């Protein structure tokens, strides 16, 4: 079952997606290799389709809940 998060929750990346989408005014697809498994970030918001805006070390990304776990 997928977890429900709230804005401000700290989360950890538990699985790398094939690609990640940046959460910018003009989003871009980036290779998942720019992220690190186990990297921690903060939830900034929710998007339709169970996607979450997460601020990580290298920027803000749209990630599905299945790739995240609350810290």
Image (cartoon, rainbow, N blue to C red):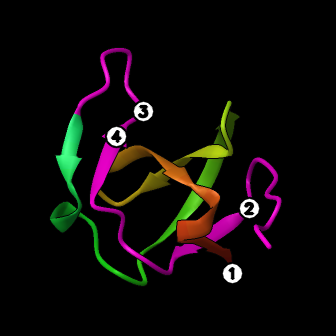
> How far apart, in angstroms, are the residues tagged by discs 1 and 3?
22 Å
Mark 1 touches mark 2? (CB < 8 Å): yes
> How far apart, in angstroms, are the residues tagged by discs 4 and 3?
6 Å
| In the image: residue 23, left or right of residue 53 | left
Mark 4 touches mark 3? (CB < 8 Å): yes
State the residue position of label 1.
71
Disc 1 versus disc 4: nearer the observer: 4
Badge 2 crowding class, 10 Å Cα cut-off, few under 14, some 14 to 19, many 20 or more, is: some
Badge 3 crowding class, 10 Å Cα cut-off, few under 14, some 14 to 19, many 20 or more, is: some
> How far apart, in angstroms, are the residues tagged by discs 3 and 2?
17 Å
- Helix, strand or loop for disc 1: loop
Badge 4 crowding class, 10 Å Cα cut-off, few under 14, some 14 to 19, many 20 or more, is: some
Q: Residue at x 23, y 61 (%)?
A: 32
> How far apart, in angstroms, are the residues tagged by discs 1 and 4?
22 Å
Q: Position of residue 59 (x, y in %)?
A: 34, 46
Q: Quadrant of residue 61?
A: top left
State the residue position of label 4.
21
- Helix, strand or loop for disc 4: strand
Q: Residue at x 65, y 76 (%)?
A: 69
Choose the circle earlier in sequence order: 3 or 2.
2
> How far apart, in angstroms, are the residues tagged by discs 2 and 4?
20 Å
Q: Say above or below: 41 vs 62.
A: below
Q: Mark number for residue 9?
A: 2
- Helix, strand or loop for disc 2: loop
Choose the circle earlier in sequence order: 2 or 4.
2
Total numbered circles? 4
């Amino acid at each position: 079952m997928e977890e429900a998060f709230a804005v401000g929750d700290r989360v950890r990346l538990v699985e790398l997606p094939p690609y990640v989408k940046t959460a910018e005014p003009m989003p871009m697809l980036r290779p998942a290799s720019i992220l690190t498994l186990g990297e921690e970030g903060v939830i900034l918001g929710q998007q339709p389709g169970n996607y979450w805006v997460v601020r990580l070390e290298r920027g803000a990304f749209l990630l599905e809940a299945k790739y995240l776990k609350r810290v």
